Amino acid sequence: MKHTRTLLAALLLASPGALHAEEHNLSPETQRTEFIRALDTLRENSLRKDDAFLRDSDDHFHVAALAAACEMRAWLWTKDERYALSALARMRFLSAKADQIREADFFTPLPLAFAYRTADNAKLVDSELRAAMEKFVALRFKPRDFDALNNQTLTRACGLELASQIWPHLPPARKWHDYALTIAAMLEKIEDVPENAPGYNALDVVCLWVLADLLTKPELTAHPGIVAMYRRYRDQISPAGFLAPYGDAGGAPQPFDADWPMTSAWAHYVAAFERAAREYRDPTLRWAAARMARAGSDHMPLGRGYTDIESLFYGGFAVDWIDATRAQEQPRLGSQLLKRRDATATDVFDKLILAPSRDDGAPFLMTDLYCRGAHGHLNQHGAETVPHQNR
């Protein structure tokens, strides 16, 4: 089978020298340090100018919002005014384009509202920026997709709910809040997310926690199906720490790259697994976070390109969510037939895994059985093995 086709399954092998490797040390301090390192690298390169991604096109203006959010988070931790000044400048440039930007209701609301709230709480927002931001969000933050969950609904719901709390006096605020409640209700009905591509699921697994927090609705993530969902993603983590790509995330590069199994977002999952481990008191979810952090740091460190700013923002929640007092525990798992919930049933076939264990160096084969899921690929009917060596 040609590498240009998307794969259903990946066989991930660790080198013999890694058989007794120690787990990645995850703590708020280590994650904070790594966050600052990656952010500084991006600020020295693709995000060097405060109007980056806001000059010629609105296609990537969400990158500016994500950058501002990361900079305000860095300012909170370091009190280095350089971060705050850049974040404020980015918000001024972005809000000034209220009449030019086509739409801003998918990737943008959550990081932009996050950045603004952090700055406003610190009394860093002047009257000019306040007025410009109110105009921008009132015009460009729009709820849509009320009747079904998709790859946009969860992150949009988080952003609009946060906006409704920051700007409750604006006319759209009630609709923003109602939209968040609608999405939460749909999640509670299905107790799972519809996506079948690790890149989109990365947003879902973080935003579920964010939405539950914003709505003060802890029962949202306590439903049996939601708990099972996080453990299902844990079970898809290979012994080497990779989440094999499938669906929209599954395209193999040409020429072939040995790091291909980790081209999907990984930092999101680290944060989500850490929060799930804390709330469910499940040390095996800390193992999943640690394995993914180790593989991601070794093979796809953040800071290499502007798209990493999204992973940095969502992965940054780990700093607040990690419970470093809870030990990691490798799950006692072998071959599995994973099932999931969707709008049709509660026991739908999801993935087939062939593996003797999750020990370092153990072979791991995963095949997608849920091609009909959102952003799944119906033409993925083959299996391909990808040898991988830890470095």
Image (cartoon, grey):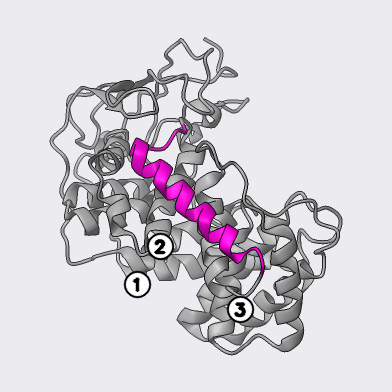
- Compared with 120, 161 (above or below) is above
Q: Quadrant of the C terminus?
A: top left
**Mark 3 is on which residue type?**
Tyr
Instruction: Out of 20 and 330, give the one closest to the viewer.
Output: 330
Q: CA distance from mark 1 to mark 2?
A: 28 Å
Q: Is the Cβ of the residue at disc 1 closer than 8 Å to that at disc 2?
A: no
**Mark 1 is on which residue type?**
Glu
Q: Is the Cβ of the residue at disc 2 closer than 8 Å to that at disc 3?
A: no
- Residue located at (85% from left, 58% from top): 100
Which residue lies under the disc numbered 3?
Answer: 83
Q: Secondary structure at mark 1?
A: helix
Q: Is 278 left or right of 90, judged from the image as shown?
A: left
Residue 196 image label: none
Mark toward the start of the polypeptide (1 vs 2): 1
- Image-quadrant location for residue 131: bottom right
Instruction: Out of 283 and 364, give the one closest to the viewer.
Output: 283
- Compared with 363, 175 (above or below) is below
- Residue located at (25% from left, 33% from top): 361
Q: Position of residue 251 (x, y in %)?
A: 56, 26
Residue 29 image label: 1
Which residue lies most toward the left here? 332
Judge whether residue 191 is colored magenta.
yes
Q: Position of residue 308 (x, y in %)?
A: 57, 53
Say few, some or many: other residues with alpha carbon within 10 Å of mark 1 (under 14 / 14 to 19 / 20 or more).
few
- Residue located at (76% from left, 58% from top): 53
Q: Where are the magenta residues, as a range?
A: 171-195
